[in-house]
Structures are given as C-alpha cells and as structure tokens.
Image (cartoon, grey):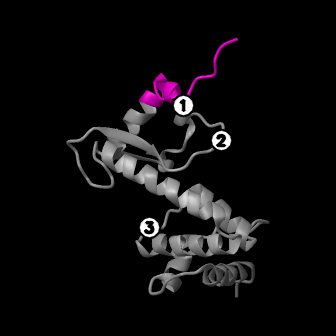
Amino acid sequence: MSKKPTYFDLLKDPRWQRKSAEIKQRDDYQCLDCEADDKTLTVHHCIYEWGKNPWEYDDSTLKTLCTGCHQSRSKLEKSIRQIMAVLPTEAVEQIHGYVLGQYIQSGLTDLPGEAYVWMESIFGLKDSTPHCDLDDVIGSTKDSMMDISKLRLILSQKRSTRNNPE
C-alpha cells in the first residue's frame, strides 16, 4: 500500500511548481505585502479547502509573498481562525460585514467567488436573482463603516429594485 503524500510532498509536484511560477510572474516577482523584489518568494494560499491539491486553487486565492511576510501572515490568519472559532455566529457575521465594508472602501469591487456565495446564502439572493454587483452597493457604503445589518438592507433594496423595475 502506498503512503499518502504529505502537503510538503504535494508542493514538489510539477503541477504546483508550474502554478507557483505563474503566480509569481503574475505578481511581477514581488511580495504583495512589503513589495520586496530581492527576497525569496513563496506563493500563499489565502484559503484552504479540504481535499484540494495546492495547484487546484483559483489564481485569485493565491498571492506572492516573501518568506517573512508569508510567516507573519500565516501566524496572523491562524490567530484569527482561533479567535473566530470561539465567537458566536452573530459576532462572526458582524466581523464579516466589517471586513466586507473595508474591502469595498479600499476600492476593490471584484469579490472572490466565495464571498458571493456567502452573500447569497446570508441575504437569500439565490433563486433567479442575479449576483449582486458590488458597484451597486459601493455608493451606499463608501462613507461609513458597514455592518451586517446595513449590508442586508442595501442588498435587499437592490434585489427589490431588480425584481420590480419601474
């Protein structure tokens, strides 16, 4: 019986090596956190999904970091996961709303796919409702911190407008 490869074995796989090289090239061989271009670079998985191989992730979930920033980011993300694990769901929703608000306020409008899935499930936007376009909500949220209840209200208003055009 063959032994299951470890995660570190998978990082040696030619498919990951190719994908890693493509991400570093996309990011201009520069750490996206500290902007260093003279340090050893790694590719960070911003999310992990059970059962996925390292090369199976969407490029939008991968970013080039130097080893120092990668270590710092990994420790920070682990700490956040540990804190989130003990919070009640309502608190996690509020944090998520705040983070989404910060994302929008930073000028980014292209949410990663999982954020759309989250928005659909939280706000009941499934059915035949098209995905919410973040450009629709930016004007309503740019000047203030967004919490989960405000985001719910904005998205329900947009949904109502789309379902009942005048």
Left or right: 166, with 75 as reference point: right
Report if residue 65 lies within the magenta region.
Answer: no
Point out residue 155 in the picture as x, y percentages from the top left corner.
65, 78
Under circle 2, the secondary element is loop
* Residue type, mark 1 in image: Tyr
Could you classify mark 1 by the number of other residues whose Cα lies within 10 Å: few (under 14), some (14-19), or many (20 or more)? Answer: few
Q: Which mark is residue 50?
A: 2
Q: Which residue lies furthest to the top in this view?
A: 1
* Residue type, mark 2 in image: Trp
Point out residue 20 in the picture as x, y percentages from the top left corner.
41, 35
Confirm or deny contact between disc 3 and disc 1 (CB under 8 A): no
Of badges 2 and 3, the one in the foreground is 2
Under circle 3, the secondary element is loop
The first of marks 2 and 1 along the sequence is 1
Left or right: 72, with 148 as reference point: left
The first of marks 3 and 1 along the sequence is 1
Report if residue 5 lies within the magenta region.
Answer: yes
The quarter of the rendered structure image containing the C terminus is: bottom right
Please give the residue where the numbered disc 3 appears in the rendered image: 108
The first of marks 2 and 3 along the sequence is 2
Q: Which residue lies furthest to the left in this view?
A: 38
Q: Residue 25 carries which label?
A: none
Q: Which of 7 and 125 is in front in this view?
A: 7
Q: 85 above or below 43?
A: below
Q: Which of 136 and 33 is in front in this view?
A: 33
Point out residue 42 in the picture as x, y percentages from the top left corner.
37, 39
Please give the residue where the numbered disc 1 appears in the rendered image: 7
Q: Can residue 27 be seen in this view?
A: no
Provide the residue span drawn in magenta: 1-17
Confirm or deny contact between disc 2 and disc 3 (CB under 8 A): no
